[in-house]
Amino acid sequence: QPKTAHQLDDIITLTKKAFVANKIYFVIPLFGFLFLLFYFNKGTNLISFIYDNSGSMTHTNAVDALSETFDKLEENNEITLTTLEGFTSPDDPDGNPSIKDLMLISKSSALKAGNVSAFSNPQEAKGGLSQVSNPCFGSPISESVWKTWLFIKETKANHTYKNRLLVIITDGGDNIDESLKTGKFFFDDESFAEYFPPENVFVIDYSEGASTNFMQRCTSAGCDIYPAENNKQDYLDALDNALQSFKNNWLLIYWTVLIFSIFTLIGLFIQPRKII
């Protein structure tokens, strides 16, 4: 107990200082959440789209849906967009006869099929959609997948990405579908599987239930298959599910920071009870 007025003033002063010091500790977790927000927002993703623009896909609305998808993607996503152009006839003799022969090729320039374009953000990629022609000759899906992989190795080997995703939009009808029944597949290549593991490969399936070896091999490898059924909303839902694997839960982060900020401000404005 203070014995004099001076001692009482000293105690009150020290108590107020301790109270203010304690309130400062309310701010530390807030800064922690803000750091978390910054951490989730940094880094660049690479999303590689392979769009099947063969004759069997002319009736779909995949281009419109893909354009809408690019509008929804954030700026920290680099895009590669591959279409199937290149062959001069449906059964171009320069095409590879089997998946085994295809996977022996190590330079993208050695492959005739597949038109690969790289974009620094989704809006640039949306502009690139205007150059997509429908239909192309043949349906070299596997060759276009492999060419995309070789292109990425050649041009982006020194880039570090937070996430890497491969999205294949197709009905699965491949020129070399017969050779896909057995034998090697993309994920048997160690470097391919390391860069694009099956859990990061998604197929937007426009086959309407038709069975193809390409789809079966993707399924067996562990890729996620999302039926689109030629409905744009189905496609958008499928792609949203595919991208959800590395989307940040921004609403949860924002609400957590907001609520904690409110309680922090309340705590900072609380004054100690007057000591008589």
Image (cartoon, rainbow, N blue to C red):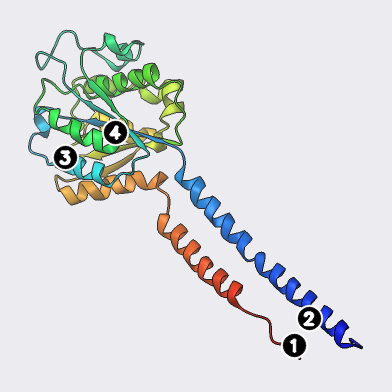
For residue 108, which quarter of the picture? top left
Return the residue at label 3.
Answer: 62
Q: Nearer the viewer, mark 2 or mark 3?
A: 2
User: How many C-alpha atoms fall within 10 Å of the one at disc 1: few (<14), some, or many (≥20)?
Assistant: few
Amino acid type of disc 3?
Ala
Q: Are marks 2 and 1 in contact (CB under 8 Å)?
A: yes
State the CA–CA distance, disc 4 to disc 2: 77 Å
Amino acid type of disc 4?
Gln
Q: Residue at x 33, y 10 (%)?
A: 107
Whether residue 16 is situated above or below residue 174 in the rendered picture: below
Asked whether residue 54 is in view, the answer is yes
Q: Residue at x 71, y 74 (%)?
A: 19
State the CA–CA distance, disc 4 to disc 3: 21 Å
Please provide percent x and percent y for residue 143: 26, 19
Whether residue 105 is situated above or below residue 47 in the rendered picture: above
Amino acid type of disc 2?
Ile
Please provide percent x and percent y for residue 109: 28, 10
Which residue is at the front of the view, 183 or 86?
86
Indicate the secondary structure of the residue bearing disc 3: helix
Q: Work out whether mark 1 precedes mark 4 in sequence or the reverse, and give the earlier one.
A: 4
Whether residue 15 is situated above or below residue 178 in the rendered picture: below
Q: How many marks?
A: 4
Please provide percent x and percent y for residue 96: 24, 12
State the CA–CA distance, disc 2 to disc 3: 72 Å
Please provide percent x and percent y for residue 217: 32, 30
Return the residue at label 4.
Answer: 216
Q: Which mark is residue 12?
A: 2
Which part of the image, by quadrant, shows the N terminus? bottom right
Amino acid type of disc 1?
Ile
Which residue is at the front of the view, 127 or 133?
127
Q: Which mark is residue 275?
A: 1
Which residue is at the front of the view, 145 or 108?
108
